[in-house]
Image (spheres, rainbow, N blue to C red):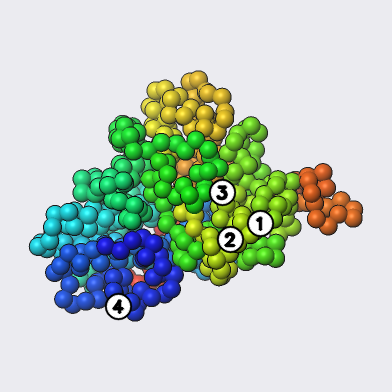
Amino acid sequence: MKTIQFILAVLGLSLFFTSCEDFLTYDKYGEPANDNFWKTAADAERAADGLYFWLGEDGIVGRGFMHYYNCSDDIVTGRTQAGCAAMKNFIADYSRDVVDNWPVMYQLIKRCNDMILNVPAMEISEDVKNKALGQAYFFRAWAYFWLAPYYGDNGENGGIPIVEPGLDIEEMDVPRAASVRENYAYCINDFKKAAELLPGFKEWGESQYGRPHKTACWAYIAKVALWDAQYDASSYATVVEYCDKVIHSGAHALVSDFRALFSPSNNYSPEYLFSFPSSAISGSILPGVMLENKGWGEYNGWGYFTPTTDLLNAFDPADDRLPVTILKPGDTFRFLGQEKVYYSNESLSGMQFNKYMQPFEEEDAIGQTVNPNGDYPTTTLNIPVMRYAEVLLMKAEALIWQGKNGDDPLNQVRRRANLPEIKNATKEDLMNERRCELAGEFSHRMLDLLRWGVAKQYVEKLLYGYTVQLKNGIEIPTSVNDMIITEMEAWPARSFNESVNQVFPIPANEIAKGKNLVQNKGY
């Protein structure tokens, strides 16, 4: 079984079509390329390694997926780009890499189905078989859950197609599930199977860190149940049950220093549950995507997805998470060995996310912790997708929404942020805490607003940022006192149609491929 870092290296060097190991080589439908497959333990391991092909897909681990987040009130596009602007304004646009999520996830589902169909009959050790099948069940559930909340509902649109193992290629064009709740039930069932088969995180051994593990499965069961609870409140009990399984496992804890959480040295800290592994060769380009456009002339920052003052003002000024999360005018930071004072005339909001900046700090960062190819700006920082703080917040939410007291898990997160404890926390307290804790991450802010039933009131507001003018004679500011900072409109008010925009448009080319896939209403 290859290490995740080896897989990243192969993806980064574009060798996965020609490598002698051939462990990532599948045809376009997800079938193993070798006709004499499913014979040996090495075959099962190669098939499992092949489940990670999407780690090199920018539409999933980089810029594309963040267009969903961009529809919320936390961020604006950051730079002028017509396709991005259309999506933020809830207008169907298929020109950006967000459209890659649908076909790539269904290719992943097909690969998982092949393993689930073939691995059980293989005459190999139970350990190899369990690990291979565990990863297949995990990633099948994960792929469905990656898509279902954005494209499916419990109303007239229904869920997304469920493709079962063993279907011939011509049979893979299946109708949509009647409800997204069918997708959620399917995901929970698969995550449960994965949890039974997979080892704990530490039991994988350090060389295999980055693969899914038992407590990650439990955390995702809780998250799927939380999404399902918007339709059936009885699912909140499942959220609490599986959050408690993670909590009581003793395998995870909050990292005491919030800033240290976003250091490559803490990629696999006790707070880690699941992430996008990355390196200076391959992985997630998100750190470079969110970096200042043109990177102050020193690196090819892309300048996408910048925070709003609405997000900034959601933080208590004393919140330790604020300076770690957002760079605002006058803040000091370190970039390629230089101490800088932040200001921007490139960003449409005049600010930048700060969570992914640590790999850029040192003078020799480029080539060491940062990809020297600025057109593929990966770093050695793994991008968190599920961490222990979210488990605590999911438990707190489930308790509060049931009319119970969620203070303990909520206040564990607040204490780490150097904030006072809350007594009898309300829904509004939880909503803001989740917003601040997970800001700038793959945090599903837009889905949160939708499932809480408050999307219209939040997304139809004007969004604001800052413009900065340096005082006369000053070329390089040394403090905020060298600046004239003005709040300005960063994004105009938008119209949100609650009967249409609760889901996103399925990519048009996916609709065109078959006869059964039907577009969401209103697009």
Mark sitting on residue 355: 3
Can residue 370 be seen?
yes
Q: Secondary structure at mark 4?
A: loop
Indicate whether 336 appears above or below 393: below
Which residue is labeled 1 in the image?
337
Residue at 53% of width from left, 60% of height from top?
369
Q: Secondary structure at mark 1?
A: loop
Q: Please give left or right for residue 232 compared with residue 487 in the image.
A: left
Residue type highlighted by circle 2: Ala
Which residue is labeled 4 in the image?
20
Residue situated in front as seen by the camera: 496 or 2: 2
Categorize mark 4 by other alpha carbons within 10 Å: few (<14), some (14-19), many (20+). Answer: few
Mark pair 1, 2: CA separation: 8 Å
Query: Residue 258 at what x, y percent from top left?
Result: 53, 39
Residue type highlighted by circle 3: Lys
Residue at 56% of width from left, 68% of height from top?
372
Categorize mark 3 by other alpha carbons within 10 Å: few (<14), some (14-19), many (20+). Answer: many
Which residue is labeled 2 in the image?
365
Query: Residue 283 at what x, y percent from top left?
Result: 45, 62
